Image (tube, helix red, strand yellow):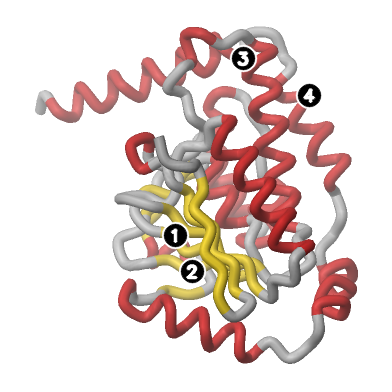
């Protein structure tokens, strides 16, 4: 099996590509830990720009539930805590971050996009935030910083899918880009960065509210309610039933 994250560095741009395309780049433990390591290394080794991308058809389809049957409530709690740790590391990175979304960008994958300073998307990208459907309060405050409180309550409360046009209008996506223009756009963004790393880090400290402790506490409180696995199992079953019903029509 290939490494869960592929790293490419050139001219101060560190590109971290989620490389579990057979799982839709869903966030399993190996991928989460590899991303955390990659972000830490990029920040400590002089990167001027950190870019998150996804291999295959999708950017990231959310929380990896492929081994749900073998997990306990405690296992699931640890996994969502590590995902929140990753999202916080991205949101408070000492250098600018860019996510380039495509295909399905849903659940924790959409939260990963929202955590980035620059949120680009290719044509045809679709987004959803279904985590509240099984009782998790993950990424809600960061989403509200991007799209506002009312839109956040709508997106999280309904779990509905939105397309690129609506995501751009809301502010979830900061820029639509063509697939064949991504590298040139990244080079232009890196070239336009006019301040040194230390100043960038200080500006980030002043402009990004540090609610990490409160956000983690709220996530843990939501995940620690008894029956997390049962709630997720019920959600997945209902989703599969809706898909089967739609396919039978």
Q: Quadrant of the C terminus?
A: top left
Q: Which type of secondary structure does the marked residue at label 3 adopt?
A: helix
Please state which of residues 37 and 114 is positioned toward the viewer in this rendering.
37
Please tell me the numbered disc located at residue 101. Answer: 1
Instruction: Check if mark 3's residue and mark 4's residue have beta carbons within 8 Å.
Output: no
Q: Which residue is mark 3?
A: 228
Residue at 61 percent of width and 50 percent of height:
152
- Residue 230: x percent and y percent? 54, 9
**Crowding at mark 2 (Cα within 10 Å: few <14, some 14-19, many 20+):** many
Report how far apart the C-alphas of labels 3 and 2 lie in the structure: 33 Å
Residue at 51 percent of width and 8 percent of height:
70
**Outermost residue, left side:** 249
Residue at 41 percent of width and 76 percent of height:
182
- Residue 63: x percent and y percent? 52, 33
Instruction: Check if mark 2's residue and mark 1's residue have beta carbons within 8 Å.
Output: yes
Where, by quadrant of the figure, is residue 61 drawn? top left
Please tell me the numbered disc located at residue 185. Answer: none
Q: Which residue is mark 4?
A: 221
- Residue 158: x percent and y percent? 49, 38
Residue at 74 percent of width and 41 percent of height:
85
Please state which of residues 1 and 89 is positioned toward the viewer in this rendering.
1
Instruction: Check if mark 3's residue and mark 2's residue have beta carbons within 8 Å.
Output: no
Report how far apart the C-alphas of labels 3 and 1 lie in the structure: 29 Å
Eyeballing the image, is 64 above or below 213?
above
């Amino acid at each position: 099996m290939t490494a869960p994250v592929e790293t490419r560095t050139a001219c101060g741009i560190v590109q971290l590509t989620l490389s579990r395309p057979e799982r839709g780049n869903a966030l399993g433990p190996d991928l989460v830990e590899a991303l955390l390591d990659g972000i830490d290394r990029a920040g400590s080794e002089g990167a001027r720009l950190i870019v998150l991308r996804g291999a295959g058809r999708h950017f990231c389809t959310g929380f990896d539930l492929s081994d749900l049957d073998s997990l306990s409530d405690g296992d699931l709690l640890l996994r969502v805590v590590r995902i929140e740790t990753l999202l916080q590391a991205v949101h408070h990175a000492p250098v600018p971050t860019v996510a380039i979304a495509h295909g399905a960008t849903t659940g924790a994958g959409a939260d990963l996009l929202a955590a980035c300073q620059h949120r680009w998307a290719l044509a045809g990208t679709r987004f959803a935030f279904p985590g509240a459907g099984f009782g998790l309060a993950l990424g809600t405050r960061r989403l509200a910083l991007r799209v506002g409180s009312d839109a956040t309550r709508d997106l999280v409360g309904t779990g509905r899918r939105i397309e690129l046009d609506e995501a751009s209008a809301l502010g979830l996506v900061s820029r639509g880009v063509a697939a064949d223009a991504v590298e040139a756009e990244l080079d232009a963004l890196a070239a336009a960065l006019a301040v040194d790393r230390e100043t960038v880090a200080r500006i980030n400290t002043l402009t990004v509210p540090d609610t990490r402790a409160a956000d983690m506490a709220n996530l843990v409180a939501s995940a620690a309610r008894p029956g997390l696995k049962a709630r997720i199992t019920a959600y997945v079953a209902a989703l599969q039933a809706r898909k089967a019903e739609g396919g039978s029509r």
